[in-house]
Amino acid sequence: MFTDLTDKLETAFKSITGQSSITDVNVAETVREIRKALLDADVSYQVARQLTDRIREKAMGESVLSAVKPGQQFIKIVYDELVSILGSDKVEIAQANMPPTIILVAGLQGSGKTTFVAKLAKKLKAEGRTPLLAAADVYRPAAVEQLKTLAAQINVPVHSISQQDAVRVAREAVGVAQSLAMDTVIIDTAGRMHVDENLMKEVRAIKDSVKPHEILFVVDSMTGQDAVNTAVAFNELLNIDGVVLTKLDGDTRGGAAISIVESVQKPIKFLSTGEKLDDLSDFYPDRMAQRILGMGDVVSLVEKAQEQFDDKQAAKLHKKIESNSFDLQDFYNQIQQIKKMGNIKDLVGMIPGMGKAIGNQEIDDNSFKSVEAIILSMTAEERRNPDLLNGSRRRRISVGSGTTPREVNELMKQFKQMKKMMKSMSKFAKMGRDLKNFPMLGK
C-alpha cells in the first residue's frame, strides 16, 4: 500500500535529514520534492499545493528544538499535516435511535461495492448487530446472485425481488427488518461504468424513499484522480456521509486517499485491502499517515492479531513456549491463525520498515504452501517430536509434500532457530516478572 509514494517522500526528506538547521533553502527544496511526490501519486494539484504550502509555512515558523534533529522535526510537521488532511479522527458510522439503521451503499460498477456490502455485514455481525442485505442492483442478475453467495458465507439474509424496481427492494427490506427485529439494513445499489443520469436518479429515489442514516460511497482507489471526480459528483447528489476505499492491495499510488477528504470534505470510514470478507478495516487518519511515511502500523497489526487469538489460546501457547514444548503442530496452527488475519503483504507492511524492505515483491497465502505441505506430510508423532526426523524420514516427507530434501532440511533448521529464540525470549520475560515481584524492587 502506497509503496511508491512512501519511497518518494523518503527521497524528498533527504534534502533536510542530516542538516544542522531548518533554513529557507532546504525547506524549499524538500517541499518541492514532496509536491512532486504527491503529484506523481495522483494527488490533485490543488490539494498537493495546499498541503505543501501549509508544510512550508509551519516549517519556517518552527523553532528547532535542541533535542530534536531538523529532519525529524520536519517529518513530524509532514505527519501532522497528513493526519489533518486525512480527517484527524476516526469517524464511526451512524446508528439509528430506533432500529433499523439504514445504510445506503453507492458506487460505480467494478469498484468492489457488492463485496464491501458483505464485508460490512460480517463486521457488524461480529460486533453483535443483526444485518439484512437488500439486493437493489436489480438490472444485473449476476449482482443479485453474487450478493446472495457472499451473504451465504456469513449466514446473513438477503432481500430481493424478481422485478427491476430498486426503490421497492429497499423499501421492502426495511419493512422485513422491522418485522424480524433486525437492527441494520445495508442496501447494495446499482453501479454503472460511469456516472450517468439514470443511475443518479435511481439512487436519489432510494434515498428519498428510505431516508438512510448513513450513505457510503465506495471508490476504487486504483482509479486515482477519477475517483475524486466521481466522489464529488455523488456527494453533490446524495450528500454522502463517508467514503470507502477499495483495492488498496493493488497497484495504487495513494493519491485518492489524500485527495478525497479534502475535495468532498467527508471522512474516509473504511479500507478494503483484499478479496476475503475479513479484509476490511476502519480508517484511522493517524495510522494511514504513519504508513504513508513508512512508519508502519503496529497498532492495527496488534488489533488484527487480537481478533484471531483468544486468551485461552494465548495462555496455552505461552505455556508451551516456556516449557520448550512448542512443536511443529503448534507452528502449523499459528500459520493458520496468521492467514486468517488478512492479506499477508498488507500485514507485513504494518511492521515498521518492512514495507520498504519487501517493495513490490508478491507475498500472499501461497507463501506458506510448501511449509504447510511439509508439515502435513509428517506423522503426528513426527510433528510432536521433530528429533525423530532422520535422513530416510526427511526423504519420505519431501516426496509426500512435493518438495526437495533441501527444503525440508531448511525448514527444520529455521524451526530449531525459532524455537531457540522463543526460549530465550521466554527466559527474559520470566526474569522481568521475577524482578518485578522481588520485594526490594517492588517498593
Image (cartoon, rainbow, N blue to C red):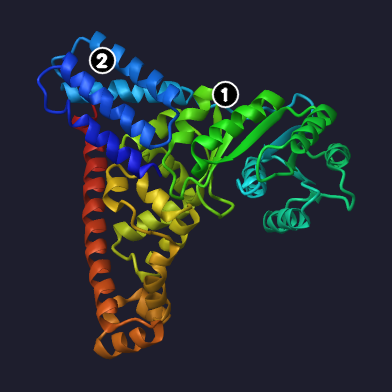
> For this rendering, which residue is in front, 319 or 251?
251
Q: Quadrant of residue 25?
A: top left
The residue located at (43%, 40%) in the rendering is 300
Q: Is residue 244 above or below residue 335?
A: above
User: Where's residue 413, x and y in %?
Assistant: 23, 71
User: Where's residue 262, x and y in %?
Assistant: 50, 23
Which quadrant, please, contains the N terminus? top left
The Cα atoms of the two marked residues, 2 and 1, are separated by 27 Å
Of the numbered discs 2 and 1, the one sitting upstream in the chain is 2
Which quadrant, please, contains the C terminus? top left
**Kind of residue at disc 1:** Val
Q: Mark 1: give few (<14), some (14-19) or many (20+) Cα within 10 Å.
A: many
Q: Secondary structure at mark 2?
A: helix
**Kind of residue at disc 2:** Ala
The residue that mark 2 highlights is 59
Q: Is residue 294 above or below residue 237?
A: below
Horizontal side, residue 143 vs residue 420: left or right:
right
